[in-house]
Image: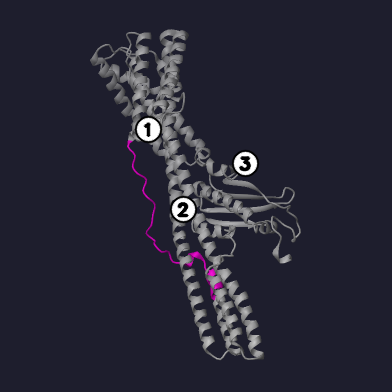
């Protein structure tokens, strides 16, 4: 669009100016290709930036001379000697536009990379969820089988002579069942079989170009185009025209920004994109019309008819990249947290049910057997005593299958970390006071929430699949200091893309860069004062001391 129009008065001369500009673009593309290839091999950001910006400045300076060489030497046009104006215009336009293109591309790339990491983690955790559901079903089947076997043994006991040896034999079966349930409770999910290894994520639907257009940020299009127009405006009419052009372009841009937001509200993506493209095309025509009035007889004012909507499209794609990165990361992060939480709850619930059943058999049923064995060892069992024994054992077996008095499932830090281990290697360091404080379900829930959010961030940002979790008690404040760190670099849009999950953890939670690590930290209050004694630490008394 920035062709040598200064001496173009006829249709042929305009076409010739456009042709010379197109050939110049092709030449510059060839010149810049080695720079693009070299840039991809550089690892130092400063060196990469210096190479790219140096190349952009060099071709911005060379482009007007190349355009004139082609326009004069090949097409016979008159030279345009406004070298300084044309060079500054190229520098401003190329730097602004290519930076916007680079930012948009980088945001799309980082969004795609984060989505691939989160999607891969979600597939892995979903497989763990299937294992947890299978483990839960196997555990329930085992409970049913053990209870059925014990009821059959109780029936055999009733039909046989009830003496000390018979009751002891039944008690041995109870003990063996208890041990089998304890072993099942200790089974690692990694060795449990998955019910369906073929499940996956739903593919992201393809979006058409117009569906990617969102209203650009306020003032962005107007300010960039005004900056590119300043050299020509000053050269054509001095400071007065420069002020009018800048004020007019920025004003039209702001009005267009507000109008597109108003018209595109509550529209579907395709209609919204059509509104953005249509309104900014109209704005370009308006700017061209104003330019034709201010600078009559020149073709330069016709440039905004294409340049303004073209710049708006780049800005609209940039806005879409920011929005899409934020929405996708939030959606997948929430799904990953939910699946991991559901997996941990399912596994923890199954383990707690097994341990409750084992404790009931080991304590309640075996205790009943001990008392009944002592009775029948002294004298033969009466029918009433046998009936009471049967009712007591049967009630205990009912409690094994339906633990209505069991506490609500509490997913601890260890269970949560175990679910995440197939996704990312997690090392934990929890000091002794924190271990006792985590016995309080409310404290454990908050710590687990922080760790889960930190592991989601680690998946998004980590340079290697490793994370370190540390929980340290701060007795002077009655708080736990929780940190989740992983090697990596926060993306440029990290605050936009990942701020919601962290904000839900409370005012103390924050994500920051520390040397080569991404760190999430939060401070969790506990109910009672933390002490250095083993008797009153954290939010719950140590049960071993009571």
Q: Position of residue 304 (x, y in %)?
A: 36, 19
Q: CA distance from mark 1 to mark 3?
A: 35 Å
Question: Mark 2: which secondary structure?
Answer: helix
Q: CA distance from mark 3 to mark 2?
A: 28 Å
Question: Mark 1: which secondary structure?
Answer: loop
Left or right: 392 as drawn, with respect to 476: left
Residue 203 drawn in magenta: yes
Query: To which residue does mark 2 refer?
Result: 121
Pointer 1 and pointer 3: residues touching (CB < 8 Å)? no
Magenta stretch, residue numbers: 180-208
Give the quarter of the figure containing the C terminus.
Answer: bottom right
Query: To which residue does mark 3 refer?
Result: 507
- The residue nearer to you, when weighing 164 against 314, is 164
Left or right: 474 as drawn, with respect to 87: right
Left or right: 444 as drawn, with respect to 194: right
- The residue nearer to you, when weighing 499 against 44, is 499
Dot 3 or dot 2, earlier in sequence: 2
Q: Position of residue 276 (x, y in %)?
A: 37, 27
């Amino acid at each position: 669009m920035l062709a040598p129009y200064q001496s173009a008065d006829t249709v042929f001369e305009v076409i010739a100016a456009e042709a010379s500009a197109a050939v110049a673009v092709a030449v510059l593309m060839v010149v810049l290709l080695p720079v693009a290839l070299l840039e991809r091999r550089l690892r130092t950001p400063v060196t990469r930036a210096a190479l790219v910006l140096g190349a952009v400045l060099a071709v911005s300076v060379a482009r007007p001379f190349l355009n004139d060489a082609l326009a004069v030497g090949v097409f016979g046009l008159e030279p345009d000697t406004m070298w300084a104006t044309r060079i500054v215009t190229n520098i401003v336009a190329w730097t602004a536009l290519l930076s916007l293109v680079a930012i948009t591309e980088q945001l799309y790339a980082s969004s795609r990379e984060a989505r691939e990491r989160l999607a891969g983690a979600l597939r892995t955790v979903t497989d763990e969820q299937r294992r947890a559901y299978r483990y839960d079903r196997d555990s329930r089947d085992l409970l049913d089988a053990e209870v059925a076997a014990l009821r059959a043994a109780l029936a055999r006991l009733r039909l046989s002579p009830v003496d000390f040896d018979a009751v002891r034999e039944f008690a041995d079966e109870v003990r063996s069942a208890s041990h089998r349930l304890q072993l099942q409770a200790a089974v690692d999910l990694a060795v449990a079989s998955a019910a369906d290894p073929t499940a996956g994520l739903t593919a992201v639907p393809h979006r058409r170009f117009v569906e990617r257009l969102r209203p650009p940020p306020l003032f962005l299009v107007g300010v960039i185009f005004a900056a590119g127009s300043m050299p020509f405006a000053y050269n054509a009419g001095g400071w007065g025209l420069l002020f009018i052009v800048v004020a007019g372009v920025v004003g039209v841009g702001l009005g267009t920004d507000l109008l597109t937001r108003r018209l595109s509200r509550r529209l579907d993506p395709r209609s919204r994109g059509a509104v953005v493209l249509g309104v900014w095309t109209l704005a370009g025509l308006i700017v061209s019309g104003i330019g034709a009035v201010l600078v009559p007889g020149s073709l330069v004012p016709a440039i905004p008819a294409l340049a303004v909507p073209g710049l708006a499209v780049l800005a609209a794609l940039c806005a879409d990249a920011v929005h899409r990165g934020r929405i996708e990361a939030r959606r997948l992060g929430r799904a990953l947290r939910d699946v991991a939480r559901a997996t941990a709850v399912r596994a923890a619930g199954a383990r707690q049910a097994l341990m409750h059943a084992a404790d009931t058999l080991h304590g309640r049923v075996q205790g009943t057997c001990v008392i009944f064995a002592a009775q029948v060892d002294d004298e033969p069992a009466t029918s009433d005593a046998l009936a009471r024994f049967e009712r007591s054992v049967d009630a205990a077996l009912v409690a094994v299958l339906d633990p209505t008095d069991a506490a609500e499932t509490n997913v601890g830090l260890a269970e949560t970390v175990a679910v995440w281990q197939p996704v990312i290697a997690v090392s934990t360091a929890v000091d002794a006071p924190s271990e006792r404080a985590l016995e309080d379900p409310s404290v454990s829930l908050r710590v687990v929430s922080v760790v889960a959010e930190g592991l989601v961030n680690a998946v998004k940002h980590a340079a290697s699949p490793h994370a370190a979790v540390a929980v340290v008690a701060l007795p002077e404040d009655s708080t736990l200091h929780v940190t989740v760190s992983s090697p990596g670099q926060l993306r440029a849009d990290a605050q936009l893309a990942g701020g919601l999950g962290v904000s839900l953890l409370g005012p103390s939670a924050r994500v920051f860069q520390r040397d080569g690590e991404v760190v999430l930290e939060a401070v969790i209050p506990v109910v009672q004062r933390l002490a250095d004694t083993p008797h009153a630490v954290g939010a719950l008394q140590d049960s071993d001391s009571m």
